[in-house]
Amino acid sequence: MKRIAILGSTGSIGTQALEVIAAHPCDFSLEVLTANENADLLIKQALQFKPNSVVIGDEKKYISVKEVLWNEGIKVFAGKQALNQIVESTEIDTVLTAVVGAAGLEPTLNAIKSKKNIALANKETLVVAGALITETARKNGVNIYPVDSEHSAIFQCLSGEWHNPIEKIYLTASGGPFRGKMREDIISVTPQQALKHPNWGMGQKITIDSATMMNKGLEVIEAHWLFNLNPKQIEVIIHPQSIIHSIVQFEDGSMKAQMGLPDMKLPIQYALSYPKRLHSDFLRFDFLNYPKLTFELPDKETFRALHLAYVALEKEGNIPCAMNAANEVAVSLFLEGRISFLEITEVVEECMSNTLHIPTPTLDELIQTDIESREKAISIIQR
Ligand code: NAD
Ligand code: MG
């Protein structure tokens, strides 16, 4: 029985993780749920799963959550500090980080320091502080299991191959809703158009990141830290059907791919159940429904965010952190209709080039870089 905490249980990954847990009551027990604002859904989830504790980020909602859950014997906490510290509870074995954005950094670091294994969906944490996170995990003997479908695919391909060096990996990308478009075609796309992902239903931020291809850029950096690869060993290939989730190429030229229908419940389940594979009722792939699996090179000129992520990875230090913070701000400004689609990447690029490079930043310096980059992004759009 693995005792699980879900950070961000009300989101896309969080709710799918709860489906996985509900389907395997003998394998998992749910101990902690956290959410930022959605108190109604958090209460509903807590009443169904009866965790030990819940945390609601928005302190104004504390009383309403507590009123309902108190009678059930569920502990209720509120606020940022509680969101970050609940992972220290001794009742947890594995923490699923399904929070969106750099807000995942502090709780993930605290979870690692308290020796909890991590099922990592929150890729931004590795982008912002990959060196610090992987080093702290190594020191504490903590495993980080990838939830992101591409990284789960790589992890699955590496099973039984631990002594065999990787020559390179191919991260597959659907290309998002604007695949094949030129810059002039996407100048005036609306948030509504950008939120229509062809293959995956996900939270708003990652869906916009998929449309700009920043998501794949973040995943390149995530892969660098998870699998200890240099930038030249990480290639991105567009695969519009999203059936092959990624590929490892070994030194003898052999390539292993992991495939299946696009369904995040599978990588979530694998990260939680590893090293076991549990039975599932997920839809099975049928070759005849996909007579053609196709591949294309990414267009890094139109989708410059992917290029910027490689630049950030080469520079390392605090530059990926600056890139991520600017991107988080730019995506939310785009969703609010305050900047255009192409301006998302322009804001990110300008913030990156105005960031003072710190080669080996401390946690405080990363937090400072994050704050400053957010401020820069705002000031750029207010000009
Ligand atoms: P989402 O927006 O649907 O959910 C985010 C969750 O985080 C919610 O429960 C919300 O309450 C919580 N949250 C938001 N801001 C917070 C804050 N400041 N502090 C604490 N909690 C906060 O997002 P999602 O699509 O589920 O994505 C979650 C993470 O998983 C992201 O890092 C994303 O890149 C990654 N991921 C998602 C998918 C997917 O299919 N959705 C696939 C791969 C990776
Ligand atoms: Mg992914």
Image (spheres, grey):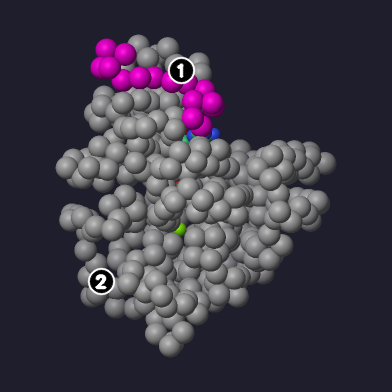
Magenta-drawn segment: 70-85
Which quarter of the image is occupied by the N terminus?
top left
Residue depicted at 54% across the width and 60% down the height: 225
Q: Position of residue 57 (x, y in %)?
A: 49, 26
Q: Is residue 278 magenta?
A: no
Query: Would residue 94 be seen by someone viewing this image from the given angle?
Result: yes
At a point 44% along the width and 81% down the height, the residue shown is 250
Q: Find residue 236 and report its horizontal and vertical position in percent.
A: 53, 71
Disc 1 within 8 angstroms of ligand 1 (CB): no
Question: Measured from the top left, where is residue 75 in percent x and y?
Answer: 35, 19
Q: Is residue 240 visible?
A: no
C-alpha span from label 1 to label 2: 47 Å
> Residue under circle 2?
289
- Mark carried by residue 61: 1
Q: Is residue 199 above or below residue 325?
A: below
Q: Amino acid at mark 1?
A: Lys
